Structure formats: C-alpha cells, structure tokens
Image: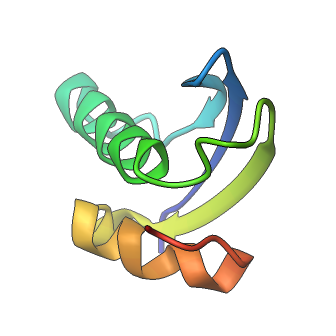
Amino acid sequence: MNIHLITLTKYNRKWMNSRCSVSSMERRKEKEDYRKSLQEAFERCGNSVHQTRLAIMIEHNSFKLDSASQALPRWGIKDD
C-alpha cells in the first residue's frame, strides 16, 4: 500500500505544497495531478483562514478529487 503525506500551507489565499513524499515508481504527471486535485479541494473551503497547516494521508489508488473532498470532514473542514 502506497501512502502519501501531503503538507499544505495556506498563505495569501493560496495552498502551497511544502512537502510531498511519493513513491519513486510514481510518474511525475500523476504527482502533479494528485497535488492539483488536493489544492482544488482545499481552495473551495477555509478561505477565511489565513494560514493553516494540514497533514493529509490518502491512499495512492484513491487520489481523485472526489476522494480528497470526502476526506475533508475527517479533519473538521467544511466545504461551503
């Protein structure tokens, strides 16, 4: 099972990836799509928070936007 740890920092209303642990077997495009999906999910919520650090662990085979959005409530984040 490949688990990814993504730490995102929100600064100036933009989520920035400060750390990304990925499998060496993973293709670059998959990494970019995964990161973009997470950023899109987080940009839809928490805009009133200036800076927040979140550690999200999501299975490698479920890194679609829907999966990321469904994971948000686990960390107490509401998607308005």
Q: Nearer the viewer, residue 51 or 5?
A: 51
Task: Please state, as top left, top right, bottom left or bottom right, where the C terminus lies in the image.
Answer: bottom left
Task: Give the total of numbered labels.
Answer: 0
Q: Nearer the viewer, residue 80 or 5?
A: 80
- Residue 21 lies in quadrant: top right
The vertical placement of 74 against 48, above or below, is below
The reply to whether residue 5 is in sight is yes
Q: Nearer the viewer, residue 66 or 76?
A: 76
Q: Is residue 35 left or right of residue 33?
A: right
Q: Nearer the viewer, residue 19 or 40?
A: 40
- Residue 67 lies in quadrant: bottom left
The vertical placement of 70 against 5, above or below, is below
Residue at the spot 75% in from the left edge and 41% down from the top edge: 49
Q: Is residue 21 left or right of residue 66?
A: right
Q: Is residue 40 left or right of residue 73?
A: left
- Horizontal and vertical percent position of residue 12: 66, 15
The vertical placement of 69 against 51, above or below, is below
Q: How is the image coloured?
A: rainbow
Residue at the spot 23% in from the left edge and 37% down from the top edge: 33
Q: Is residue 5 left or right of residue 40?
A: right
The reply to whether residue 64 is in sight is no
The vertical placement of 58 against 49, above or below, is below
Residue at the spot 51% in from the left edge and 68% down from the top edge: 58
- Horizontal and vertical percent position of residue 66: 24, 72
